[in-house]
Amino acid sequence: MNILENILPVLRVAQAATAGNPIPGLEGAISGVIALAEMVLTMKGNMADLPELDKRLKHLADIDPVGCSNNLKQRLDMLKDNLKTITGRLISLEKKSKFKQWLKSKEYEKEIQDMKASIASHIQDFTFHNSISIKILVDQMSTKVEKIHKLVQDMAPEVRDVNKTVKSDHIEQTLAKIKYVSARYNAPNTPDKCMQGTRIDIIQDIIAHLTAPPDPSQQIVMLSGSAGTGKSTIAKTVASILAEEKHILAASFFFSQNYAERQEIKGLPLTLAYQLADYDADFKDILVKFLDKDHTGILDADPQVQFYKLVVDLLAQIPTSEKLWVICLDALDECGQDRGQMFLQWLSDNITKIPGHVRFFLTGRPNVPSYLKYDVLHSLIHGIILDDIDKETVGKDIRRYLEQSLDGNSWMPRYPSWKPEVHDVDKITRFCEA
């Protein structure tokens, strides 16, 4: 039996053992040797076999056993070196094969047989070098890979935790660069909520419109009224319900002329971006990625540019959602010297780019909605005017407020024996209604 007939089964078993092994050059090295062995085994000695043999030898010489063990690399290098002499003999043989009489000579036949025998001997040495089968080397590499794989699997949770921590730290550090204003609905020095049992119908109407299914024609709720009509207390109550019960308050900003940072529009865009990132994880990721790539100094840019780049443009990248996002801005009439006109212009210029599930709840004195009389926003507004509410409803709310305020539980009267009578409450209520 030809020596290669004994070697090939061993090589094929080794080749089968490489299946699924992630070492890049292992399977290619074994397959290249098998291809050469099969070629030599089937050679008939014809002139046509010589180019194919040359091709196999060159292919084997080009194999890179990347990732393989040193033992296998040494075997392959030794095989390549030994086959270099075969390549030289092959070139000489191809030149002589041009002469027909040479092809028919016994010398040609002997040269072919000697080459085949030499190649077979070198492949045998590759397969059983130092009496160690190539299959054993492959198995050893597979075992090593399995151990490494198990070690990596055991470390994976720790690596994931480290990556998660690193990512979390990076996000926190990036967001910490945003100079936001403490003007959220529940920030210090914001108005009180409505007293329990008062302004019920108005609050329910506002909540109903803000929580209704998305409707592009009702993207804004505007609450307006004269000074002292309770706009900010209503806004505080509505914002609290949206945040703590409905979980749809995406951002809020309560303007106030009494506090420097809350009486100007310049702090609004960064504050909205910061709060929106706190509200939604997807927005946070988009914002952090944008800031990572930014080289324009956006955090110190003009507020109008910040509003477009950090609020409008990023909101436009959020897919349409069934979950509503409400942005509450209270007391626009206390926003800058133009009493909120600048923000309304920003909103008017960009409202078509903002997804329909994002809604705005705005409050201000009567002059604020009057700016929108001929504006594109006018058709998107559900307006509520506190001055138009019937006096009977207002009177009931005032009376309830007075009754609860004068019950002695929340204040210490100068004359402890005095308690308000019904006619006292009636009289104060009439003064307030006037």
Image (tube, rainbow, N blue to C red):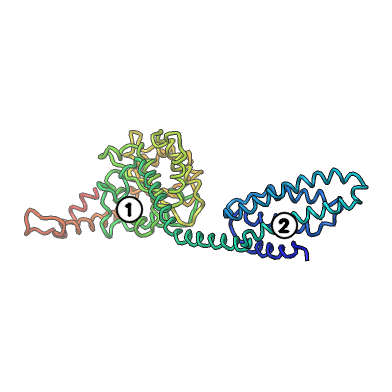
Give the residue at x 59% y 63%.
Answer: 139
User: How far apart are the alpha carbons under marks 2 and 1?
Assistant: 109 Å
Which residue type carries mark 1?
Answer: Asp
On the question of residue 348 being in view, the answer is no
Q: Which mark is residue 170?
A: none
Residue 297 position, x and y percent, is 42, 34
331 relative to 412 in the view: left or right: right
Which tag, 2 or 1, sits closer to the chain's start?
2
Provide residue 383's location: percent of width, then percent of height.
41, 48
Residue 409, above or below 258: below
Say which of 286 and 168 sits in front: 168
| Pointer 1 local density, CA inside 10 Å: few below 14, some 14–19, many at least 20 | few
How crowded pointer 2 is (Cα within 10 Å; few <14, some 14-19, many 20+) is rated as some
Q: Which residue position holds label 2?
A: 121
Report the residue at 93% width, 47% height from top.
101
Q: Report which residue position mark 1 lands on.
A: 390
Q: Residue at the location (41% across, 33% down)?
A: 302
| Label 1 residue SS | loop
> Where in the figure is residue 409, as x and y percent of width and height?
15, 59
Instruction: Find out whether the residues at labels 2 and 1 contact each other: C-beta distance under 8 Å.
Output: no
Position of 38 compared to 207: left or right?
right
